[in-house]
Amino acid sequence: MANIISDETIEYVGILAKLELSDAEKEQAKADMGRMLDYIDKLGELDTDGVEPMSHVFSAENVFREDVVTNGDDRERLLSNAPQEKDGMFVVPPTF
Amino acid sequence: MDILDMTALQLAAAIKQGDTTAVEAAQQMLARIEAQDKTYNCYVTVDAEGALAQAKAVQKRIEAGELTGPLAGVPVALKDNLCTEGLRTTCSSRILHNFVPTYTAEAVKNLQKAGAVILGKTNMDEFAMGSTTETSAYGVTRNPHNTEHVPGGSSGGSAAAVAAKECFYAIGSDTGGSIRQPASYCGVVGMKPTYGTVSRYGLIAYGSSLDQIGPLTKDVADCAAVLEVLTSHDEKDSTSIARKDTNFTEALTDDIKGLRIGIPNDYLGEGLDGEVREAILCAADVLREKGAVVERFDLSLVEYAIPAYYTIAAAEASSNLERFDGVKYGYRTKDYAGLHNMYKKSRSEGFGEEVKRRIMLGSFVLSSGYYDAYYLKALKVKALIKKAFDDAFSKYDVILGPAAPTTAPKLGESLADPIQMYLGDIYTIAVNLAGLPGICLPCGKDSRGLPIGLQLIGDCFQEKKLIRAAYSYQQGRKAEEMTCVSNVENGQGGEPA
């Protein structure tokens, strides 16, 4: 069954993905995603009733370590990668 | 022998004997990069000054007897998604164009401890998303065997650098075939180890449950030696495994008597180029003549690996790439109105087309209402695929097949149709879903002179069997056998010729 991606869906995906798309990009994205989902729908041919989803190949258990600080103060070097910084802090636009 | 023609192990031995020095090797390599990398574009960043400083320090330690390992003093190229303290790391993306990590990836630290000299960072598909290295924001890399063709991807710069002799060995990462497929296209050896073997700490994540770091080398002996150095248990990667049997170079023996090798019929079917098929079957003959038991079998579920993979990888990518938001590092858009607009514009301008395509797909398959139908379904199919491999490895020690359906395509032919490009991953991708080790090594060339790669797949933790089989094949391969006519063409395979 062909997947038709609506304008609303692409808007919603844009919000989730934090991407701003031009009108031309939206049309392209609708076509690309529709085709890809058509392809992924192939998985529906397989009966997976009762199959446990496998997120990790090896049995994943929590891996703990002692809560000991091993890294030093790296603030200046970390901040040097920031597009904008002031007084030892990252600068962002107003959030309200 | 010209230094540049040496393997990594040969060079280290020559340095140890005093026939040459780490500094001489680095200088010659940098001169070669300077002379020819404008043509191939294997590197995003070359660190000439840093490499010479490292080489001098390493040479001193070799002379002082402090560095005695089999790779001490050998120059290496690193894929540009491995963090290197003080050296720009871009993931071949505009969004990280000026990112200078404050720490070094654990795998790279292991190389440094072994006396590696880092030449620079190699080109790749942006965030490792692609199969041709054409999605890089820093230009395409050209295949050294024919500059009209792609080197493969996503570790295309690393594979091309080895093939072009612009490094003695390189490091790549493999999420769906990104080491093995470019190794195949460039005629070099590439290995993806069992998931958890090499620490992912400091590897910029794409699909975390699938990503694994591994070597790209000139031959199988180098591959085993580099893998041995890369391997370690690391507390900083919660998926890192404490492995015991990691002296991989011990497996460099020319003995495969009785080794059970299975060739999936599903890997020889529709879509496989005739010349690639012939070369793979000839390689199987070489192994049979050396005493391996070679059979054909049905692996099943092969056509479901690609849709399952792209669902899972896109989902993980959409989450992993959330961190690139124009606040802590990398690109920030010039004009914006408020925080969310800044996020959106920085990401939209900073990421390339293929990356955005996968982030959107990933966001969709994880979204409420579609999670069960797509993401959870893919994880269930992954369990079935793992089971199919478990069944296969109850009968066989090694699975043999091609690494890619064709030899390297021409530049510009692949990106127009993403799904067609994804289909090129059909023989490599299931290996990542099942966490298995896989190695690709050259097994001939097609009529246009482009390399063909042989892929060997092992059960989890069975790298030694792969290395033994690969080494035996490499020893057994002779020039005349490259033009042989295979005798396993029909059914379960014939008698040795």
Image: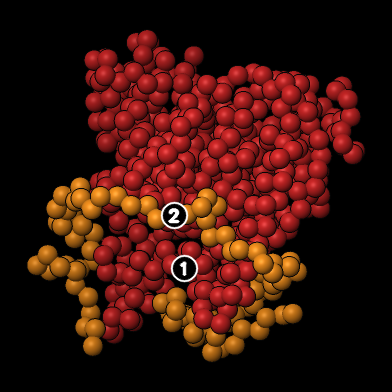
In this picture, residue B156 sits left or right of residue B258: left
The span from disc 2 to disc 1 (Cα, nearest Å) is 24 Å
The disc placed on residue A64 is none
**Residue B312 found in image quarter:** bottom right
Q: Residue at x 61, y 32 (%)?
A: B466
Chain that is red in the image: B
Q: Residue at x 67, y 57 (%)?
A: B384
In this picture, residue B271 sits left or right of residue B254: right
Secondary structure at badge 1 equals helix
Image location (x, y in percent) of residue B8 = 46, 24
Q: Which residue is mark 1?
A: B318
Label 1 crowd (10 A; few <14 / some 14-19 / many >=20): many
Q: Is residue B413 visible?
A: no
Q: Amino acid at mark 2?
A: Glu
Q: In the displayed structure, would residue B476 be above or below residue B394?
A: above
Q: In the displayed structure, would residue B453 be above or below residue B259?
A: below
Q: In the displayed structure, would residue B180 be above or below residue A25?
A: above
Q: Which residue is mark 2?
A: A61
Q: Residue at x 49, y 86 (%)?
A: A11
Q: Residue at x 34, y 58 (%)?
A: B97
The chain holding disc 1 is: B
